[in-house]
Image (cartoon, helix red, strand yellow):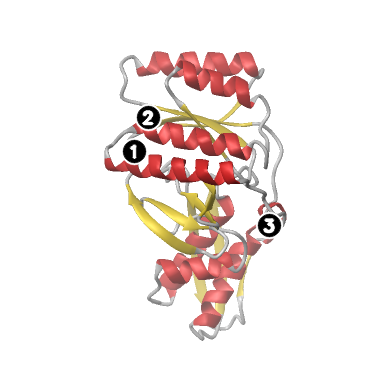
Amino acid sequence: MQGILDERPFLVSLPINALKSDATFIPNTSYSHVIGSQKNIKAIDACNRLLRLFQIKGGGILTIDSNIEPGKGMASSSADIVAAIRATADSFNLNITEEIISAIASNIEPTDAVMYEGTVAYDYIKGKLIEKLGTLPALGLIGLDLGGVVDTIQFNQFQKSYDLRDKRKFMEAYDLVKFGIKNNDLSAICSASTISARINQRILPKQHFLEFEKVANLHDAGIIVGHSGTVLGIIFDPERPNIEEEYSRILKEISIIIDNPNILLRV
């Protein structure tokens, strides 16, 4: 979920082990800075900022291997930046914290909270931890791409307008997340994510949202969206009986809404 909490921009992170970015950094003291592929320009910037922060002379070569598609709202840039900072820090034996990583990342662009373990509430604009929430209950997820890409930096330049009702709904959703984690109650998590997704329809609407929400309701599931991207997912209890049949039914119902849906993720 993502929105505003006590007049502060926030998100609640959703760690997905299947999505990852691996960075390799080869230091070279004869270089004046870090170099690498143009597609990794944000991660390269992060490495150079780290070296300047610690007054390290030299540079090196950065490479990144990621299975996260960019521009979809799945924190691809954030994952690259965090992986790159950690790889560079390891190469120079630098002692870094999540706070240092957050400060560097948020000065480049609004950032996801992937530098933190578990689920957290996080100010994605200022790069500040709000609260550590713990570990989410086990969940199943079918994620699909609705097409196109979103530039995170450009998207976050526009002021998002939330009314009083939205703010109350975000507080309700946040309380549901905390309740769900504390009590291992996935239904509370599903309700919270759906509330946030509904509000986001006015900010960055997803095609066929109401149809997808009907599918989720049929399966006692929730809707999750990329608040700054093009993805939409259905989350549900993976431990219910006949789970493979459940997956198949959901996929069939999605295919009725969209011909040949682009399924990015199934966990």
What's the mark number on residue 261?
none
Vertical placement of residue 181 versus 10, above or below: above
On screen, residue 261 versus residue 186, left or right, reads right
Residue 192, horizontal then vertical, whole percent: 45, 37
What's the mark number on residue 153?
3
On screen, residue 187 versus residue 111, left or right, reads left
Label 2, label 3: how far apart the Cα atoms are: 33 Å
Q: Residue 235: which quarter of the image?
A: top left
Check contact, mark 1 vs mark 2: CB within 8 A: yes
Q: Residue at label 1?
A: 180
Q: Residue at label 2?
A: 187
User: From the viewer's perspective, is the residue at label 1 or at label 3 nearer?
Assistant: 1
SS under mark 3:
helix
Q: Residue at x 51, y 86 (%)?
A: 55
User: From the viewer's perspective, is the residue at label 2 or at label 3 nearer?
Assistant: 2
- Judge whether residue 240 can be spotted in this image: yes
- Judge whether residue 267 can be spotted in this image: no
Residue 145, horizontal then vertical, whole percent: 62, 33
SS under mark 2:
helix
SS under mark 1:
helix
Q: Residue at x 56, y 36 (%)?
A: 197
Label 1, label 3: how far apart the Cα atoms are: 32 Å
- Of callouts 1 and 2, the N-terminal one: 1
Vertical placement of residue 136 versus 124, above or below: above
Indicate the quadrant containing the C terminus: top left, top right, bottom left or bottom right: top left
In depth, the one of 88 and 2 nearer the eye is: 2
Q: Residue at x 60, y 80 (%)?
A: 31
